[in-house]
Image (cartoon, coloured by chain):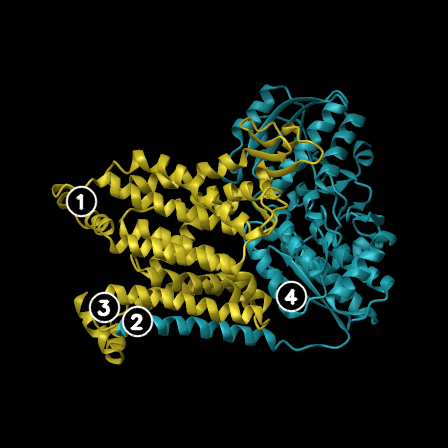
Chain colours: A yellow, B cyan
């Protein structure tokens, strides 16, 4: 172990930490020792961990600001719901259907991510932030126009651009099922997401993201972030590497969205609005840019906080905001850092380096 | 290796937090002889006004029933901010509390998610105001106090066909909102069936509900003399203000979401004169029960109750009556109560603030008479009296 590189150790610790956390929670859940409140939060926490880690790839590693990450989640969620609902009879096995749904969700997000990324990532400056901001809004409005139904003739999809059509205009058969009803969102979704599936998705995300970061490609991406001109001068294809990070991030967000969408009986597009994008960005920033295990812990803590604060009733979001500010202040406090440095000698050198 | 230790420590801290939370919830004390009723609704956020009204209504009903002696209730309202995911979290928190029946969820989309959970857990739910048919579809444990969206759309079209058959109708609705879209869909198809003329349909979304000059001007250009607004009252107040600004004076017709327009802040309530709306509840009704309710609500919360409060109040009395009918006792599990209530719900008749003789079909849909009212001198009156 001593001979391992520092980064390898951190990665290993992240894998082990996530696995141990999963095993403990899963054992508690199957043993019935968990409250319903916590059991119910396990799957969304997994989804948001994947969201935060994948956004960290764009914001922390590739150094681009993305403000529309929830848009990819949305695409993935509705793509996954359509796949899972329409394949309900073709694939009776729930785990297999979930895998297919996640794959479809990821694929949809990849396509969209590619379309958004190709023109924008050629540019210098903060254009990605502007475009992704708009993208999040556009996706929300597009899905509000989407009418999808399924019957024995297959999928029926209609874009209700004029706003004058309703699900009845799909002319589904008697046995047909409406999957997405425009603004009313997806209703009657069969819940097939599970905590083990969430864990597998988190692990998969970690394997992909951590290996990417530690690879030659990852170093190229970080070189571009640190000094674009220098990276260009050694012959790195800027757009290619940025696009790679962006599309992988979109794919993971899509899969997370599919898992999320299939965890609830109903889903509306307005769930994935600007606030959700910012929420994920807060997880990333609070966990530390480029710090993967930090993102995981920040997500878990910040997701559970509003629920843990339920006894404050109306004031819980106020308390939540205060906690956020305190955490920001505390992590940037020099005295606190020095104090930590005394307790953990290792920290001293880290603090000294900054 | 230090880094590894540190990471592990961080995880352990998180785990400890989780476990400590478990114990907090588990220690909630059991009380004997009291039914535990949970409430779910948006107590904060954009839809807070509805959630708070409904929960206040339930609380008043609980206080009244407890004062009667006999069956006692403990009511625990939980906030869901109007989001499906938070709503399920709130539901789970209520389950940990030991909830035996739920009044909620107030808004439609969260209610669909929560009712799916409650259906598999077998917990009885009665929503005061989630009006979509998807809420009750395929779930035997889910009942509604409010009209379903199709009912409202059809009732509005029927009312217009009967009283204003020659009206040139414009519809302005919110096409990213399940409630608004649902009513619009059934209204338009019923209007076609009744040969009403819809001359214009304008849409808006959550993000564009601050300015309606385009839609209002288009409705005016289309020559509409009746504007149907199947929307909540906040955007409706903007539409009324902007229509007034360009001198456009059609008859505005709203549904139950319009209820509350007279209490919008910074809104000139005189602009709402002549607005018609279909609502099951009027705070100015003369009967003693409504007057008592309005007075109590005013004393406790300092405002006139809207229809959501009345729906919440009725929901609680419905559960009370159903529990009595089914002979449930407080020591029964949520599951036993659920099955018992499902058995009696289609058989009971409840006289509430939002309708006399309310009955339910076994699908969960309520049957009561909608009432059209007109705003005159700042109060709701029946259209017949307004014309005198």
Q: Could you say which disc has been placed on residue B4 in the image?
A: 2
Seen at 41% across and 65% down, the residue is A18
Label 1 marks which chain's residue? A
Q: Could you say which disc has been placed on residue A4 in the image?
A: 3
> Circle 1 sits on which residue?
A228
Whole-percent x, y for residue B319 in the image: 79, 60
Label 2: which secondary element:
helix
Whole-percent x, y for residue B187 in the image: 70, 31
Bin the neighbour count of mark 1 within 10 Å (Cα to Cα): few under 14, some 14-19, many 20 and up.
Answer: some
Q: Along the line of sight, which residue is nearer the eye, A251 or B59?
A: A251
- N-terminal of the pair, mark 1 or mark 3, is 3
In the picture, measured across the screen, residue A20 lies left or right of residue A27, that is left
Label 3 marks which chain's residue? A
Numbered disc in front, either 3 or 4: 3
Label 1: which secondary element:
helix
Could you tell me how far apart the alpha carbons at marks 1 and 3 are, in whole angstroms? 30 Å
Whole-percent x, y for residue B2 in the image: 26, 74
Q: Quadrant of the N terminus of chain A?
A: bottom left
Seen at 60% across and 45% down, the residue is B264
Q: Along the line of sight, which residue is nearer the eye, B144 or B278?
A: B144
In the picture, measured across the screen, residue B11 lies left or right of residue B27, that is left
- Marks 3 & 4 on one chain: no
> Circle 4 sits on which residue?
B95
């Amino acid at each position: 172990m001593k001979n391992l590189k520092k980064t390898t150790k951190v990665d290993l610790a992240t894998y082990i930490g996530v696995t141990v956390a999963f095993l403990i929670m899963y054992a508690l859940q199957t043993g019935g020792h968990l409250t319903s409140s916590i059991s119910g939060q396990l799957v969304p926490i997994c989804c948001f961990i994947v969201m935060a880690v994948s956004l960290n790839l764009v914001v922390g590693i590739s150094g681009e600001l993305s403000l529309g990450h929830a848009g990819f989640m949305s695409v993935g969620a509705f793509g996954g719901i359509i796949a899972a609902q329409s394949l309900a009879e073709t694939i009776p096995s729930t785990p297999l259907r979930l895998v297919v749904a996640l794959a479809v969700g990821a694929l949809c997000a990849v396509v969209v991510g590619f379309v958004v990324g190709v023109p924008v990532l050629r540019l210098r400056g903060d254009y990605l932030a502007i475009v992704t901001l708009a993208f999040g809004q556009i996706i929300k409005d597009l899905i509000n126009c989407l009418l999808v139904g399924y019957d024995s003739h297959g999928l029926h999809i209609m874009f209700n651009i004029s706003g004058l059509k309703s699900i009845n205009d799909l002319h589904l058969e008697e046995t047909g099922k409406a999957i997405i009803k425009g603004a009313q969102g997806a209703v009657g979704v069969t819940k097939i997401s599970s905590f083990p599936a969430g864990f597998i998705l988190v692990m998969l995300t970690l394997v992909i993201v951590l290996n990417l970061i530690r690879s030659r490609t990852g170093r190229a991406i970080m070189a571009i972030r640190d000094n674009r001109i220098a990276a260009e001068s050694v012959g790195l294809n800027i757009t290619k590497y940025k696009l790679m990070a962006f599309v992988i991030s979109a794919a993971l967000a899509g899969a997370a969205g599919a898992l999320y969408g299939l965890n609830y009986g109903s889903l509306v597009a307005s769930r994935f609005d600007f606030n959700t994008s910012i929420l994920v960005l807060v997880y990333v920033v609070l966990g530390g840019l480029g710090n993967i295990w930090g993102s995981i812990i920040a997500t878990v803590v910040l997701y559970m906080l509003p629920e843990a604060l339920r006894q404050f009733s109306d004031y819980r979001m106020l308390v939540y905001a205060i906690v956020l500010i305190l955490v920001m202040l505390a992590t940037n406090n020099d005295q606190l850092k020095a104090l930590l440095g005394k307790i953990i000698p290792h920290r001293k050198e880290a603090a000294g380096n900054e | 290796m230090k880094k590894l230790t540190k990471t592990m420590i961080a995880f352990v801290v998180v785990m400890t937090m989780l476990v400590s939370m478990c114990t907090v919830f588990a220690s909630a004390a059991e009380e004997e002889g009291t039914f535990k009723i949970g409430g779910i609704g948006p107590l904060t956020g954009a839809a807070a006004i509805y959630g708070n009204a409904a929960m206040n209504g339930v609380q008043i009903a609980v206080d009244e029933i407890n004062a009667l002696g006999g069956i006692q209730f403990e009511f625990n309202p939980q906030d869901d901010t109007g989001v499906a995911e938070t709503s399920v979290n709130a539901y789970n928190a209520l389950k940990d509390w030991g909830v035996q029946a739920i009044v909620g969820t107030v808004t439609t989309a969260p209610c669909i998610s929560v009712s799916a959970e409650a259906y598999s857990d077998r917990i009885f739910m009665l929503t005061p105001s989630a009006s979509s048919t998807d809420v009750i579809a395929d779930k035997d444990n889910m009942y509604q106090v409010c009209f379903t969206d199709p009912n409202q759309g059809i009732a509005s079209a029927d009312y217009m066909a009967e009283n204003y058959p020659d009206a040139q109708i414009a519809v302005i609705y919110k096409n990213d909102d399940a409630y608004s879209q649902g009513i619009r869909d059934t209204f338009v198809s019923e209007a076609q069936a009744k040969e009403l003329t819809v001359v214009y349909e304008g849409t808006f979304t959550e993000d564009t509900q601050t300015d309606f000059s385009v839609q209002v001007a288009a409705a005016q250009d289309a020559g509409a003399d009746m504007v149907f607004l199947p929307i909540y009252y906040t955007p409706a107040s903007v539409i009324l203000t902007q229509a007034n600004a360009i001198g456009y004076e059609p008859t505005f017709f709203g549904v139950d979401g319009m209820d509350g327009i007279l209490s919008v802040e910074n809104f000139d309530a005189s602009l709402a004169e002549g607005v018609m709306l279909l609502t099951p509840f009027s705070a100015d009704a003369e009967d003693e029960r409504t007057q008592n309710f309005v007075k109590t609500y005013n004393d406790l919360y300092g405002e006139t109750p809207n229809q959501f409060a009345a729906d919440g109040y009725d929901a609680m009395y419905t559960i009370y009556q159903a529990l009595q009918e089914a002979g449930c006792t407080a020591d029964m599990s949520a599951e036993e109560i659920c099955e018992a209530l499902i058995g009696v719900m289609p058989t009971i008749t409840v006289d509430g603030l939002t309708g006399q003789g309310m009955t339910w079909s076994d699908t969960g849909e309520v049957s009561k008479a909608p009432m059209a009212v007109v705003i005159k001198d700042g109060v709701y009156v029946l259209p017949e009296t307004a014309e005198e």
